[in-house]
Image (cartoon, rainbow, N blue to C red):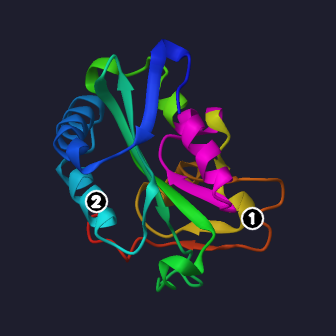
Amino acid sequence: MTTNRKQITIRPETHKDYKDIVSLVLRSFKEGTDYSDGTDIVALIEEIRDSEYYIPELAFVAELDGEIVGHFLFSHFPLSETAEGGHGGAKDTDIVMLAPVSVHADHLRQGIGSAMIKLGIEKVKELGFKGITVEGNFRFYNTVGFRTSSEYGIYPVSGYPMKEPRCQMCMETYPGSLEGEGGYVVYDMYYNA
C-alpha cells in the first residue's frame, strides 16, 4: 500500500524489521508521550505476536525514503460478555483491536499516523472484519472515523477510559456492522496491556 502523502509506503512487517520496530517504538513513546518509555509497548507487541490473536496480514510498518517511520497492528479482539473478563478464542470474533500505533519521534504530527491508520482500516475492511476497537486520544482517532465505543454498547472496564470514556472508541467497517455486538473491553489476555 502506498499513499501520496510524502511518499509513505505501508507494507506488512517482516522478521527483519523487528529490531528497527523496537528502536522506533522506544523512541516514539519516550519522546512523544508522558505515560510510557516504550518498554511496555514493545512487550505488548511481542506478546501479541506470540498469541493466537496476532494477524500477520494486519501488522504493518510505514516507510519514508526507505526508513521505517511508523508501526501499527490490528489483532483479533473478542469482547467480554462481563466486566470481569474472560474471552473466547481469537477465531470467535469479527472485531479487531488497533494497538499499538507508533510514529518515529522525528516525524510526529506530519500526517504519517493518519495515513497509516486510514490504509490499515481499508485492509481490515478487505479482510471482512465487522469492527475495530482502539483506546487512545479521541481528538486524533475521531478524525479518522472512530466514535466513542459506548455508542455501540461496548464499554471500557479499566485504565484511562474509565476517567474519560471518549478514549475507548470503535469503528464499524460498514454501516450497522457492530449492531448487536456489545460487550466489554477487557485486556486480560495480555499481561502488558
Residue identified by numbered label 2: 44
Residue identified by numbered label 1: 178
Residue 126: horizontal and vertical position, in percent? 67, 51
Q: CA distance from mark 2 to mark 1?
A: 26 Å
Is residue 144 in view? Answer: yes
Q: Quadrant of residue 56?
A: bottom left
Which residue is at 43% across, 20% downward?
A: 109
Q: Is residue 27 left or right of residue 180?
A: left
Task: Looking at the picture, tell me which residue is in the foreground, 71 or 189.
Answer: 71
Residue 175: horizontal and vertical position, in percent? 83, 54
What is the three-letter code of the residue carrying label 1?
Answer: Leu
First of labels 2, 1 by sequence position: 2
What is the three-letter code of the residue carrying label 2?
Answer: Leu
Which residue is at 49% across, 34% downward?
A: 116
Write down the region rendered in magenta.
117-143
Q: Is residue 122 left or right of residue 62?
A: right
Query: Relative to 87, does residue 26 appear above or below in the rendering?
Result: above
Looking at this rendering, what residue extends furthest in the right direction? 175
Residue 80: horizontal and vertical position, in percent? 55, 80
Task: Looking at the picture, tell me which residue is in the foreground, 89 or 11.
Answer: 11
Q: How would you rate the neighbour count of disc 2 (Cα within 10 Å): few for under 14, some for 14-19, many for 20 or more?
A: some
